[in-house]
C-alpha cells in the first residue's frame, strides 16, 4: 500500500564546504508538514469511517506504555515503524567495572522496519535546486550524553554544526528556541546561554528547568555570509525531535 510511486518528496541543495570543489552540494528533504498522533488518527478516521478516534487514541497509548515498559526491561520491541532497544553510552575500564551514572547512560536504538525501508526506496524525488536561505543545521550533539540528533540534557551543553547558522540580526525573532511538540510551548534560549556563535558552529546551554518531552529546535537568523545582513530573518527547523 505504501510502496507505490505516488509518494514524493522535495529536496533542496546546500553548500558542501568540506570538499575541494566549490560547486559540490548535499541534499536535504524539505519537511512538508509536522504531524502528531492526533493528526494521524484524524487521517485514519477519514479513510475508515468505521474507526473511532477515541478508541484509536486509547489503543495507541496502551500499546506505547507496554512497549516502553518492555524496552526498559531489556526487550527488543517491534512497534510502529521500527525496532526499539536499549544501547549503552560510555566507556568501562576493566572487566569488573561498575556502572557510573556520571560516565555511563542508556540510550534508545531505533531501526526502521522493512515496510518503512521499502516505502522510502520507492519514493519519488523532485530537486528544487539550491536552498534560498542556505541555512542548515547538520547535527545537534548533546555534550552530557554524547548522543547526536536525539537528546537534550537540562543544564547541559549542546553543539550545533551546520552552514550559515550564526545567530545575528536585530529582529526580535532572531535566536534559538525549543518548541514542545505536544503542547507547542516555546522556550527561548537566552543570549547569555549561547557560548559559541560562528557560521558553522553554535554552542548553547539547555535551560536547567526545561520540562520533559520531545522538542523541535528552531534557529532564526539574519546572517547572510556577507557584510550586509538579510533584510528579513529566516528560520530553520531541525528535522529530528530532541528528547528531554
Image (tube, grey):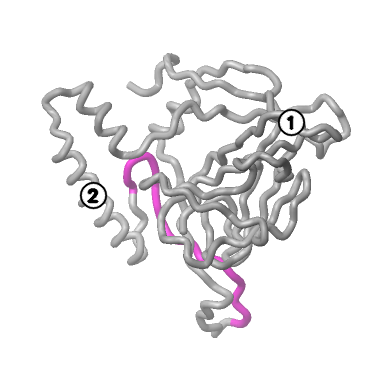
Q: Residues within 10 Å of mark 1 (few under 14, many from 20)?
A: some
Q: Which residue is mark 1?
A: 230
Residue located 57% across and 41% down the image: 238
Q: Seen in the image, is 140 located left or right of residue 244?
A: right
Instruction: Residue lying at the far right in this picture: please name it.
Output: 20
Q: Which residues are magenta?
A: 78-94
Q: Is residue 184 above or below residue 212?
A: above
Residue located 65% across and 58% down the image: 204
Give the image quarter of residue 159: bottom right
Instruction: Residue lying at the far left in this picture: please name it.
Output: 50
Q: Nearer the viewer, residue 71 or 25?
A: 25
Q: Seen in the image, is 192 located left or right of residue 97?
A: right
Q: Seen in the image, is 227 located left or right of residue 104?
A: right
Q: Does the segment drawn in magenta span residue 86? A: yes
Question: Which label sits on residue 30?
Answer: none
The percent coordinates of residue 160 (x first, y second) are 67, 50
Q: Does the segment drawn in magenta span residue 171? A: no
Residue located 86% across and 35% down the image: 227
Q: Of the two numbered discs 2 and 1 on the same chain, state the one appearing first in sequence.
A: 2
Give the image quarter of residue 184: top left
Mark 2 → mark 1, Cα distance in angstroms = 45 Å
Q: Nearer the viewer, residue 18 or 5?
A: 18
Q: Is residue 135 above or below residue 150?
A: above
Quadrant for the N terminus, please.
Answer: top left
Q: Is residue 196 above or below residue 34?
A: below
Q: Residues within 10 Å of mark 2 (few under 14, many from 20)?
A: few
The percent coordinates of residue 81 (x first, y second) are 37, 39
Q: Nearer the viewer, residue 159 or 231?
A: 231
The percent coordinates of residue 73 (x first, y second) are 33, 66
Q: Which residue is mark 2?
A: 61
Q: Secondary structure at mark 1?
A: loop
Amino acid at each position: 500500500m505504501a510502496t507505490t510511486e505516488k509518494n514524493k518528496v522535495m529536496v533542496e541543495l546546500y553548500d558542501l564546504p568540506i570538499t575541494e570543489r566549490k560547486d559540490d552540494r548535499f541534499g536535504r528533504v524539505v519537511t512538508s508538514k509536522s504531524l502528531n498522533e492526533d493528526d494521524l488518527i484524524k487521517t485514519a478516521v477519514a479513510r475508515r469511517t468505521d474507526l473511532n478516534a477515541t478508541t484509536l487514541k486509547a489503543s495507541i497509548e496502551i500499546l506505547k506504555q507496554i512497549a516502553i515498559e518492555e524496552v526498559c526491561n531489556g526487550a527488543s520491541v517491534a512497534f510502529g515503524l521500527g525496532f526499539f532497544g536499549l544501547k549503552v553510552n560510555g566507556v568501562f575500564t576493566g572487566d569488573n567495572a561498575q556502572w557510573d551514572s556520571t560516565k555511563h547512560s542508556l540510550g534508545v536504538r531505533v531501526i526502521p522496519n522493512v515496510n518503512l525501508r521499502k516505502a522510502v526506496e520507492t519514493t519519488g524525488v523532485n530537486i528544487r535546486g539550491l536552498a534560498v536561505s542556505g541555512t542548515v543545521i547538520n547535527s545537534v550533539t548533546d555534550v552530557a550524553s554524547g548522543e547526536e540528533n536525539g537528546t537534550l540534557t537540562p543544564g547541559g551543553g549542546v553543539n550545533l554544526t551546520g552552514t550559515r547558522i550564526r545567530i545575528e540580526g536585530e529582529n526580535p525573532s532572531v535566536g534559538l528556541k525549543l518548541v514542545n511538540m505536544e503542547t507547542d510551548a516555546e522556550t527561548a534560549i537566552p543570549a547569555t546561554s549561547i557560548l559559541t556563535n560562528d557560521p558553522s558552529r553554535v554552542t548553547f546551554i539547555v535551560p536547567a528547568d526545561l520540562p520533559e518531552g520531545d522538542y523541535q529546535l528552531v534557529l532564526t537568523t539574519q546572517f547572510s555570509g556577507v557584510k550586509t545582513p538579510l533584510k528579513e530573518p529566516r528560520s530553520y527547523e531541525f528535522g529530528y525531535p530532541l528528547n528531554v
